[in-house]
Amino acid sequence: MKRIWELDAFRGICILGVIVVHTVFDLRYFVGLQFSLHPLFRIIMDYGGVLFVLLSGVCVTLGSRSVRRGLILLCFAFVITAVAEGMIALGMAGDSVHIWFGILHLLGVCMLLYPLYRRLPTWAMAALGAAIVVLGYWFQTFRVDAEWLFPLGLCAPDFSAGDYFPLFPHLGWYMLGTVLGRTVYRERKSLLPKVPQDIWPVRFFSFCGRQSLWIYLAHQPVVYGALTLGMYIMGGNI
């Protein structure tokens, strides 16, 4: 089936936003640069992840083998968690770099859960997704003593993580994405067919969207390595 270009392009824009956010984090955390953040950056930081999860929910209705894809994502997620814990153990990073339940953990679990609710009526799926979103933001207003509930969005007072996307509210956003996939993209074709897809911005963002997993896996080592090299050349260190 022909790919829907705008979904790839929007996902590409989102993954590039992730690179910007993580680069700024590395500059502030590892390099020690202190600078004010532009309001646009804060918007990307606060809402870019939500948009990416919504898009992933749309895409799961257009693809197949969600369980297989979910298991693959979880394998990559656990590798990232292990790398982060190794950096902390070696003294290369502090506790704020923990990745207990990041974006890949979330999307992997969401893909595994999708077959369990895919047969719900669209209105029920929308209502359940909205309820999970509301509950998730309510969970952020308090802390609990149980340290093992963090995947649900219920955090202990000392919980810290560098990349954290709990099921509440993000499973709700994912489900609302599947609602959009069922309704807005029910015919499984582009909503913007007249936009020329051969111009370079569209091709570039679409390519990034198609390769979003590999870009996500590679970008942090590349950014961290570039900063390390730059600090070495300038006589400093990370």
Image (cartoon, grey):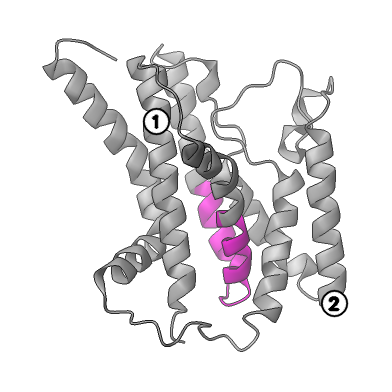
Earlier residue among tags 2 and 1:
1
| Nearer the observer, 40 or 46 | 40
Q: Mark 1 points at which residue?
A: 24
Residue 126: image x %, image y %? 81, 66
Find numbered disc 1 in the image and state the secondary structure of the residue it sits on. helix
What's the residue type where badge 2 is placed?
Answer: Pro
**Span colored in magenta:** 52-75
Q: In this view, does 65 lie to the left or right of 14?
A: right
Q: Residue at x 83, y 25 (%)?
A: 142
Identify the residue shown where x is 54% and y is 17%: 95
Residue at 38% over, 15% down: 92
Which residue is more in the foreground, 213 or 172? 172
Residue 121: image tag: 2
Secondary structure type for disc 2:
loop
Quarter of the rendering containing residue 52: bottom right
**Residue 30 position in % (x across, y down):** 37, 18
